Amino acid sequence: MSTKVFITELPNCDICKSNEKKEVTAKYDGLTIYGSWANMCEDCFQDYGKGLGTGQGQELILKASTKEVR
Ligand SMILES: [Zn+2]
């Protein structure tokens, strides 16, 4: 069970985008208090996230591009 997911490119925060029309790099992918899933930045995760854990939320970790595999 991992609460971290390694990705090559961080998405933008869905909540900042819809609420404030801002582009903020997301740090978490998780369940919100509204019952839907969203990419969330640190602040939004504190305010709207249900927490980390399986079926709840994962921390997004930027993966350094080690190998260029195509
Ligand atoms: Zn946000």
Image: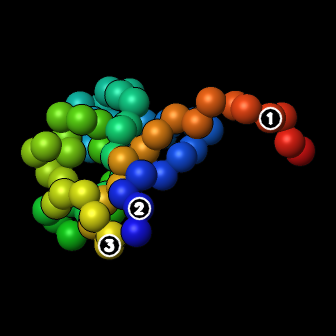
Instruction: Kindly identify the residue that appears in the image at 19 percent across and 41 percent down.
Output: 44
Residue 70 on image: x %, y %: 89, 44
The residue lying toward the viewer, choosing from 22 and 48, is: 48
Apparent side of residue 21 relative to residue 69 in the rendered image (left or right): left
Mark 1 burial class by Cα count in 10 Å: few <14, some 14-19, many 20+: few
27 over 53 or under it: above or below = above
Instruction: Find numbered disc 1 in the image and state the secondary structure of the residue it sits on.
Output: loop
Instruction: Kindly identify the residue that appears in the image at 36 percent across and 47 percent down.
Output: 59
Disc 1: which residue: 67
**Distance Cα–Cα, label 3 vs label 1:** 30 Å
Mark 2 burial class by Cα count in 10 Å: few <14, some 14-19, many 20+: few
Q: Which quadrant of the figure has residue 23? A: top left
**Distance Cα–Cα, label 2 vs label 3:** 10 Å
Disc 3: which residue: 55
In the rendered image, the residue lying farthest to the left is 47
Is residue 19 visible in the rendered image? The answer is no
Q: Which quadrant of the figure has residue 68? A: top right
Disc 2: which residue: 2
Which amino acid is tagged 3? Gly
**Distance Cα–Cα, label 2 vs label 1:** 23 Å
